[in-house]
Amino acid sequence: MGADLGRWELAWRRLAVVADLHQRRHTSDHTFERIRQAILEVCGGRCKKDLGQFGGYLVFDALIGNTDRHHENWALLKREAGPTDHRLAPSFDHASSLGREMRDERRLRLIRENKIPEYLRKGWGAIYLEELGETEISPIELVSRLAARMPESFGPWLKRVEGVTDQAIMYLRPRANHAGLDGAIRTPRGADLQLDDST
């Protein structure tokens, strides 16, 4: 039990250092490599699966423009008493995405002017590519660079995104309305969808 607690505390302390440096220097060493190291230290036989799952979280962040995957918006869950029996927690806190800071008029203008890709590329994510790097990176650019380095963790998720159809987007429409979302979304082929029950 003591060794297990020590290993968990070590991983947690590393993440606390990330948060402290970010606050003091307005930069971060909350990098994918540090996250990868934390997972490898406590995942036991699940390392490949958990790293692949985290790759999926980052692909999802890029897809929805989530810029808030900071050190408190992912976690490792303890499963049993063993020192390396942890698993990656399910993804959570996606509120900083989908243009949440914009009014409907601006969202519609971005859709009509086909500027969503530009908007997504400009969003700075909370995970840095290089340790103590001064340059923030968008979730899309982060995935692009990491996918080239780790195709086994990112490739399957990118294939899934490529397979998203207009029909799948239409399936989500009533759920988005039920969740209280308003305005419009755009399908991969570019058609505007109004999120209301009148269509």
Image (cartoon, rainbow, N blue to C red):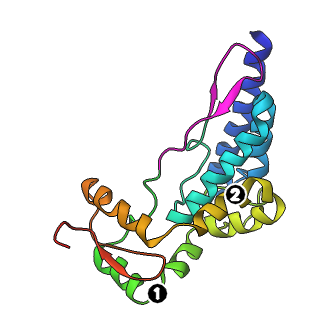
Q: Is residue 20 left or right of residue 72?
A: right
Q: Is residue 146 left or right of residue 98?
A: right
Query: In the image, what residue occupies the spot 43% across and 64% down?
Result: 168
Q: Is residue 171 magenta?
A: no
Query: In the image, what residue occupies the spot 69% across and 63% down?
Result: 143
For discs 1 and 2, the disc positioned in front in the rendered view:
2
The percent coordinates of residue 24 (x first, y second) are 65, 50
The percent coordinates of residue 48 (x first, y second) are 78, 41
Query: In the image, what residue occupies the spot 77% across and 57% down?
Result: 132
Residue wearing tag 2: 156
Q: Which residues are magenta?
A: 76-93
Q: Is residue 107 left or right of residue 31?
A: left
The image quarter containing residue 174 is bottom left
**Amino acid bearing label 2:** Pro
Q: State the residue in front, 55 or 107.
A: 55
**Amino acid bearing label 1:** Asn
Give the prevailing secondary structure in the magenta stretch: loop
Quadrant for the C terminus, please.
bottom left
Q: Is residue 73 above or below residue 44?
A: below
Q: State the residue in front, 112 or 194.
A: 194
Residue wearing tag 1: 114
The image quarter containing residue 178 is bottom left
Residue 89, can we see it?
A: yes
Q: Residue furthest left?
A: 198
Q: Residue furthest front?
A: 167
Q: Secondary structure at mark 1?
A: loop
Q: State the residue in front, 10 or 180.
A: 180
